Image: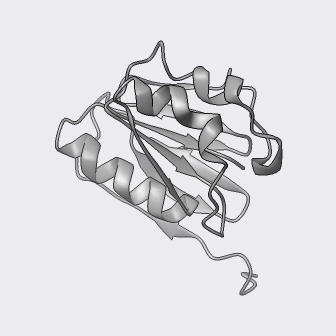
Amino acid sequence: MLHTSEVILKLQLDNLGETKMFTSHGTDHVMVNGERYGHSIVVLAGGVRSDWAATQFDELTEAHFAYFLALKPDVLLLGTGATQRFPRPILYRALIDAGIGVEFMTTPAACRTYNILTAEDRNVIAAILI
């Protein structure tokens, strides 16, 4: 039985190929190319990484954002859960200084935006906090 607090949205594409795309999301998970993740992940067109140490928004540090410097995206999308939240700018200042765009949005919005930008062959990363 699906409760109203368990809203699940499926995102389908005709041909995913090897490009990593969000295929659904719920309150406690996201799915990438049909694989379910119930923990924080980083998604790039070429892969899914589970080595990002961030687990909760309130515990984000400069080191959590510095993780993305070596990956060199044009844009970083941070999915902050059901509510859009904004960390202190000092935490992600190094990304801005490196010319990396940083956007904070709800997880559903981050999933949709990532899929659109990836389909446009943009160099985007989605970091999703679960």
Left/right of residue 50 with respect to residue 54 in the rendered view: left
- In this view, the residue farthest toward the bottom is 4
Q: In the figure, 99 relative to 59: above or below? A: above
Along the line of sight, the residue nearer the viewer: 46 or 52: 52
Name the residue nearer the viewer: 10 or 86: 86
Q: Residue pushed farthest left?
A: 120
Left or right: 55 in relation to 65: right
Is 38 positioned to the left or the right of 20 in the image?
A: right
Indicate the quadrant where residue 54 lies: top right
Residue plotted at (36% across, 56% down) = 113
From what the image shows, is residue 100 above or below residue 98?
A: below
Judge from the rendering whether residue 6 lies leftward or rightward of residue 36; answer left or right: right
Which image quadrant is residue 18 in? top left
Q: How is the image coloured?
A: one colour
- The image position of residue 72, as x and y in percent, is 38, 19
Residue 128 position within the rendered picture, expressed as x and y whole percent measured from the top left: 60, 45
The residue positioned 56% from the left and 59% from the top of the image is 107
Residue closer to the observer: 44 or 92? 92
How many tags in the picture? 0
Q: Position of residue 117 (x, y in %)?
A: 26, 46
Identify the residue shown where x is 39% and y is 43%.
21
* Residue at image point 60% right, 66% down: 84
Q: Position of residue 13 (x, y in %)?
A: 28, 53
Q: Quadrant of the N terminus?
A: bottom right
Q: Is residue 124 above or below residue 69?
A: below
